[in-house]
Each structure stands twice: as C-alpha cells, then as structure tokens.
Amino acid sequence: MNVAKRNIGLTFDGSHCNFRIWAPQAKQVQLSVNDKNTIDLTPKDYGYWEANHITNINETDLYWLKIDGKQLPDPASVSQPEGVHGPSQAVNLNEMPTPEHWQNIPLKDYIIYELHIGTFSEGGDFEGVAEKLDHIIELGITAVELMPVAAFAGKRNWGYDGVYPFAVQTSYGGPKALQQLVALCHSKGLAVILDVVYNHFGPEGNYLNEFGPYFTDKYKTPWGKAVNFDDRGSHGVREYIIENAIMWFRDFHIDALRLDAVHAIKDNSSSHILQEISKHTDLLSKQTGRSYYLIAECDLNDPRYISSVEQNGLGMHGQWIDEFHHALRVAAEEPKIGYYSDFDGIAHLGKSYQDAYVYTGMYSKERDNFFGKSAQGHHSSQFTVFSQNHDQVGNRMLGERSSTLYSFEMQKLLAAAVLTAPFVPLLFMGEEWAETNPFLYFIDHSDPDLVEAVRNGRREEFAASHLDGQAPDPKAEDTFKRSKLNWELLQQTKNATMLEFYKHLISLRKKYSMLQTVDLDTVKAYVFQPENSLIIERKCAEENKSILCLLNFSSNVQQLSV
Amino acid sequence: MNVAKRNIGLTFDGSHCNFRIWAPQAKQVQLSVNDKNTIDLTPKDYGYWEANHITNINETDLYWLKIDGKQLPDPASVSQPEGVHGPSQAVNLNEMPTPEHWQNIPLKDYIIYELHIGTFSEGGDFEGVAEKLDHIIELGITAVELMPVAAFAGKRNWGYDGVYPFAVQTSYGGPKALQQLVALCHSKGLAVILDVVYNHFGPEGNYLNEFGPYFTDKYKTPWGKAVNFDDRGSHGVREYIIENAIMWFRDFHIDALRLDAVHAIKDNSSSHILQEISKHTDLLSKQTGRSYYLIAECDLNDPRYISSVEQNGLGMHGQWIDEFHHALRVAAEEPKIGYYSDFDGIAHLGKSYQDAYVYTGMYSKERDNFFGKSAQGHHSSQFTVFSQNHDQVGNRMLGERSSTLYSFEMQKLLAAAVLTAPFVPLLFMGEEWAETNPFLYFIDHSDPDLVEAVRNGRREEFAASHLDGQAPDPKAEDTFKRSKLNWELLQQTKNATMLEFYKHLISLRKKYSMLQTVDLDTVKAYVFQPENSLIIERKCAEENKSILCLLNFSSNVQQLSV
C-alpha cells in the first residue's frame, strides 16, 4: 500500500480526479455525479473498481455510487453534507494549510485536553473550538484530543456511532474546517489527537454490507457482528481501516490517534490490524519526517499492545489506564459498585503509580478471572491517566462530573493526583474550572425503532445497577444542550480559583522534570491505609534528588513517615 | 500451580487419596464411591471443592460426583471403564514404570511415525502397538505419535471426539496400559508423542457445562461454542487444560504433545493458554531434568506460535506444515480441487523447502485473503512435514492412501521428498509398505440423532465437493475394520521393496547431517517448472560441501543444470 496518497474513494490530482472502491460482490459499479453524469468503473484485482483521470467532477459536487444499479453513498466519502443517507461530496483534501515548521511534541510531554466538539462551545463546531483555543493554551495544555468526528446519523452524538470513517461530520463544519482547526492548533504549538473507532460501526447509515464482507459472525461483540479483520475477504476491510488511519495523519496532519476500545478488535491473523496500522504509520513517518502516535484504549492489561511490532507487539505507542481512574475515584470515596467494586482505593492507586496496571495477574471478582500482566520495562509515557473522561462522566446515569460529586478540596486533590503522576495526564473539558453541567449521553438517530432501542438499553443498564431516578432521554435536544460547557462559570470566583489551581499544577509539572514521565521502576509509592494517604516518591537518578507527592484522601491532617 | 503433583481429580498419596474439583456454580458437591460411601467435599477459593486424606477409596473403585444431588462422572477422571456416561474409576498413576535413564531425543532428530491405536493392529489397543514396536524401530523411526487416546463415546473413533481429556480410552487398554507402552518405547529408545485436543470437546458424553463455564459464545467454532479460555470464569478451564498437558508429561512420561488445531483455540487474554502451557512445561522440565516438546497443528502461517514466550510468542516448539503436503501432492499431480486449488505444485514446493510456509503474505484465492507471514529466522526442526497423515488420507471420501492414488515410483518420490526435507519428517502408519487399505472416517456414538447428523455432515461435505460415489457409513463397524492395517502385505515383494526403500532413506538421513534439519536460510531450491522438477541444495557451511536432492515429478528423464 502506498501511504503517500489516498488509495480509495475520490482523490483530486491536479485538474482531474481518480476513484477507487472495493466492491468484490458487485457486477457493475458506477459513479453518478450531480445526478447528471454517470461514470463506469473498471473492475480490478481483488474486488476493486477504478476510474482514473475523471475530468467532470469538481469540488462540492455531489455524487452517488451505483452498485448493480443500487444508489449508495461512498463508503470512503470524506463529506456527507446531507447526512448519512445522502449523497457524498467531492472535497479536495490536498491543500492542507498547516505551518511547515510544525513538529509533533514528544509523547512524554503531552498534557491532553479531551473535548467533544458539539458541547465544548455554544456553536458546537470546529470554529467554536478555534475561538477557545487560547483558553486551552493558557491552561498549559500541549495536546488537544477531539472526540470522534466521523460522520454519524443526525446532528448530535458522542461520535461512537460513526458510519463514514473518512467523512468529517457536517454539523461540526466538515473536512476543510477540521483541516483549518488543526493548522490553527499547530500554529499555536498545540498537538492534535483524534479519536477513531475501528471496533464497530454505528447502527444507522451503515451501508458497508452492500459493498463487501465488512462484518463477520466469527466473533460476538457488544455491538453485534464483529468488523471482519481476519475472516474471508478481510483484506479489503483491512486496507479500508489502514487507509483511514493514514489519511488523518497525511491529509489532516493529525499528530496522534486515540484508537477506541481496541480490545474489541478481534484479529487472529498472522498480522494483527493494529500491527499493520503501526507499520504503515512508521512508513508515512519516514516519508514525511514527522512523528505520529497511536494511543489505544485497551482494557486487557496486556503490555503486548504497547510493545513494538519487532517484539511481536501490536505496535501502539501508548494506552489509556482506566484502572488508575477507578482506584483514584475509590480513594476519593466513590461507592464501590459496578467496575469500582474491584478497587480498594489507596493501595490500588499506589500500585497503579508504580506499575501502571493495577491487576497484573491477581484475581478480579468483577471479571471472575485472574487478570492482567505486568507492564514493567515500559516507559511511563506510554500510559494516559485521568480523573474524569467522557466515558467515566457520561456513562453515569446523570452524567455528573466530579464537581457535583466531590468537595472542592477533593477535586483539587484529584487534579494533583493526575497532574503529578508519572504518566501522560488527560483532562476532560471543563474540569479545569469545575464545570457543573453534566455530560449526558445523547443521540440523534432518525429511525424511531432505533431510538426506542437506545432508550430501553440505557434504562435497562441503569435498572440493573439499581440506581434511583431516571436517565434523561438521549434523543431529546435538551439532553444535548444541558451537556454544553457553561463558560460563564469562569466569571465566578470558585471556578476561576480552580482554573488557577490547574494552571499552577501544569506549570509545576513543566518546571520539574522529575514530575514528568519516567521509567516505571523509578517510582515508589508508600501506602498509608488507615490514613487513606499516599506518598509518591519520584527519584531522579542523575541528580540524586527526589520529589515527594503527598496525597491525603482523608478529611484529617495526617502525620506520615517514610 | 504446582506442576509436581496432580491438582485436580482423584490423586493417590501413599495410603490415602485427595480429591479436588472445580464446580463454581454448585451448592453441594459429593463423592459417591462404589455406590456405598458418600464423601462431602468442602468449598474452597475460586469455585474449587476438596476432600483430603480420604482413606476409603482403593484402586479400581468406581465413583461418581454428585453436584447438588445430580450424579455425574468426574471431568478429571483418568478412567471410564463403562464408557463416557458411566462412573469414573480410581487409578493410581504414581507408579509409572519408565526406565530411569531415558532422555528425550532432540527435536531435530525426530523421525515421526503417526499411528491410530484402533487400526494399527488387529487387537486395536496399546498391547497391539507394543507387539509391533520392533517393526517401527527397524524402520529407523525415533518418535512414535499416538493419535488422541482421551476417552470418547463408543469403541471406535479417530480420537478427536474425546470428552474426558484426562482419561485413557478403555478400549485401548486404559491408563496403566498406556504407561506400560510408553515405558516400553523408552526402553527401546523411542520417544512418544501424544495428540491432544484443546480446541473443542466431543459431542457425546460432555458434561462439562454441569460443572462450570467451560464454553463461551464469544467465538464461533466449527464445533459450536468455543472452549472458554478468556471469558468470565475461564481460570478454571485454563487450569484444567494446563493440568492436562502437564499430566501427560509428568505421569505418563510422554515426550511431546501434538496440539490439535491450535488456530481454533481463541484466547485474547493477556496470557494466551498456549503461553501458559509452555511456561508450565518449562517449569516441569526444570523439576524433572527432562525435556518436553510442544508441537502445534496450526494453519495460520504465523511464526508467533513457534516463537518463545519471552519474545511475546506462544511458546510452541514446533508446528505441522500442511502447505508442504499440499504443494507436494499437487507436484505429484493431485487434482487441484478444494484446498489443493491454492497450490501450483513444483514452485510452491520449492518455496516450502526454503521458507517452510508457502503463503507468506501473498493472496490466497481459496482463503480470499493475503495470507501468512515469513518464518525466516526459525530453525527447520520447528516444522513437521509429511506426504500423508490421518487427516489428509481420512478426510478423503474414500480414505485412499497414496498407494492407491499414485504409481509405485511416485510413492517413492513422495517418500524421498519428505525424508530428505530439512524438516522433521512424519510418516503415517503403513505408508512405509504402501498399505492399500483405506483410512476411513469412523465413529461409534450411541445417540442415534448424533449418528445421523454425522452421516449427513459427511454426505453434505462430499456433495459440496461434487465427488462421485458415496461415503462409507462412519458408524458401521466394517468401516473401522476396513481401515485396519494389513500386515500380511509385508509378505508381498512389492510392499517389502517399499519398506526397504523407506529404511534406506531413513538410514541416509541419519548418516548425513546435511540431510537433517538446519537454519532455514541454508536451503536453496531450484525450480524447473517445465521439467516439473526440483533441485534442493543443502549447504553445510563448515565443510564447504553441499548435498543436492533431485526430485523429478515428471515421467521423463530430465537434464537440469544449476
């Protein structure tokens, strides 16, 4: 695969266009442009169809694919201006306006700010983010992480229901606006992480099955049939996904991908799709001279995911550590229900500071298994930690942020625990000023049965957890609107104070290299169970110095000795 | 896990017995001995139940387990004298009579003879094998491979329908007779390989679901629900399988396990079950000072399976190479249908000589995928090759061996291709004298619906391949009897000649180290497509010598130059 150019979908090349699509079961494939011109595609090897040197397609033109006469949007579409059921749109992605001098920030220096485009600003689009970039920069953030932007049904969604992995959601501003936002971030010294979903596709607007064997029943997933990465015909699916990862780096100048729930990607072939993404990313990196990072969300406590391909690893550069979050929240007296029930707070938090993973082979009651493996030998910059994120907030029935669950002082402690950790810290938008608006679950599917199914799913989920009250209606626009950040809060003393505290912590982290990422074995955690307190010692071998971080989760003054 | 002793099932320890079983859903577990004594088991951690220092169980006693009052055989039974639905039997495995001096043969020196206990001799049991051992030794074989012996329904089966992985089939002679056979092999200098099946359980007599979550619907397999190696509660299943592998080595002094179809073992946990088997085998090896090998049947062309656990591999020492067989058979003009359709004969055979795997990333039409990965860097002793085996013969509708498919001269060429290969050669019982009896598929289930389902399955399979004729009835005793070796044939000149040819080839292989296994990159194959011939050059760096093996698959004299 040539990573230097787009190999599928519609590509502009000077004055003409090329088109290539995988439709192995089709007998005839055509492009229908502006409901006027019909272009016949030529069958090629391995189920691909091509047309080259097309001259009668211009930017903003709308087009359909006709598969044996059936009109369908382009699976590799980069723009769906009329939504997931509408025509695709021709967009020239070649003129990305990024500053030439931009170089990615080393992963170990990432301080991440996760945001959801739709609820971050009043406008709910890329422009809304652009307007607030200075706030993020003043805070001290080095990398902004965008929740998924791949086109989904309707106007409101977290982004995990995307069905056009190459298309940028129109309600966010579409592909050109994303290119502009990335360029702006780079001009201001900010790296950009994009959340991508390769473990499933959304339930509405997914026409992939009409094109090829994108799904397999070899594996069961929470979302039904698994994406086909190793069953018959998976080569086309694999190329589609590799192409996608490469597109974000090459055409949008994204600096890192956050790969959603990679434990749900099932691939037992001799080359795991993550290895292939890693290898192709390295290839592009060599061509462009830029570095790109792959950061996986993975709940398997398996360091193979973050080991190099040469070592039979899956080649991810980093991963999220939910266990740090769970242990931290239990230390802060989060009720031990659901996934929190496996965590005992302070001792597990101490373990996570030292070992990243809490479960490294011990018995987990919640999983009814001996779980995980030690990650010793890995660098702490491979692990991303947080006290909140979109999932941990939004998967609560009422979407409560820490601000409405913990005291002001405890929120400060949570912030310090994350921002002095020997890992890559991640903040969830608004936590820096103790935003009180919830982050709720919302969708905007058009199919009423699907909407009802989502509503019922949420209801049953929370009923099973024996929670009182009622989940807000995910389809209601108000649920979305209530989830927007309230920037007005920054005028309040309390919120401004919290913001100053976050800024101070980040500047401390930047000032002292000992507060940054390290080899895991240089971190020592002292656990004081009765005092519900921790001392984290961060050694610096060369200078014969240590920094001690004292974390007192109790309400009392404590005397601790090490 | 302590590998020095049996941790599940019934164990003799001096004058008393211990019993331990995993039954995580049970509320009460009892042992019922000889329909007289009932012993209550005590619940322990992680779903286990135990009784120690039991004094009223003696060898040959029959016993049942009662799970909440329901009478069931012991899943870790070592003997089922009345069949898969009957009681389990107490057997003391501690007094294995192997010669003390026995040391396993280096894997690179294995010359394997695969045999099926039931059809190898008239008696169809371990004693029948013992009587014929001298034939095998005179042939030059160094390791005898027993098809699975785990207890299955009825008296006749290939062995892949086993439902008691710890129990030795009674119609073969049971566990003590197997111990005696292994000891006899060792006393004669023969290593013993045992075929074990960890990817599924047979369809009749499988009571495992009554004990715990042995199965999962996370994955689909050709045999229905997958064995649960990574879903909730899999820890008990994993211990069961690891215990089983270790038992064969420790209590039966088996030298190597052949692990059936490991590609069908699905495990996405951080420690693959094969890695665990490998690690525990190493542990036992350290304790006993003996070496043990793990040889996998695997059709993924993924060298990770045969890489060490330290290198994130799955820790198998070796694997079967079906592709060598397929390429070889097509070179010998096997019709290119079914899985043969992917092979072009001579060129692919040459590739296999050099690279072990034929498909190392190329497109496979049969699989509709780009398939496999290079195994370069591995030692050729990690690959087992053959021109026939139980599957390749028995999965033909009429179970024809090469003797009824190819000319006498072609059979000799096939033998030479295997026995001069830089891999571990494997013969299928009887091929050394060009046995003409078929090796058919046979079963002896008692459930009439199941028998009918098997019959229909076979019929449909062959109908799909558009084969003429009719598959013999798998349930008929005659189908089994017709599959027995005809030792009388050895009296015939033709068959005796073939035997002498095999003996000669094996003695050549033993005489010239250059004909044995090597680093893969010292083998060079010269392909002569129009001549349908191959020259295999085997270099010996130290001595500056080569051996050339000339393989002419055409019917003509050929002039070849290299």
Image (spheres, coloured by chain):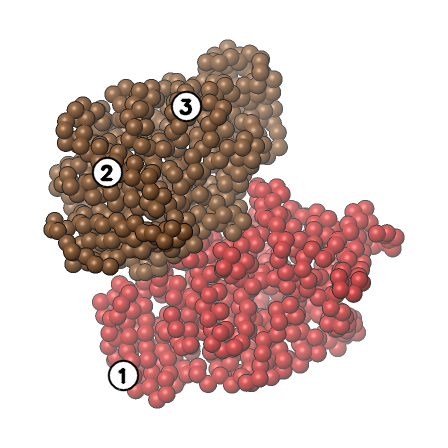
Chain colours: A brown, B red
Q: Which chain carries label 2?
A: A
Residue B133 percent coordinates (x, y): 64, 80
Q: Mark 3 points at which residue?
A: A187
Near-viewer residue (B135 or A400): A400
Q: Mark 3 lies on which chain?
A: A
Lateral position of residue A395 relative to residue A250, left or right: left
Q: Name the residue under label 2.
A: A393
Badge 1 element = loop
Q: Which chain carries label 1?
A: B
Residue A168 percent coordinates (x, y): 40, 24
Near-viewer residue (B418 or B461): B418
Q: How far apart are marks 1 and 2 (CA)?
A: 60 Å
Q: What label does residue B133 carry, if any? A: none
Residue occupying image coordinates x 30% and y 49%: A547
Give the mark count: 3
Residue type, numbered disc 1: Lys
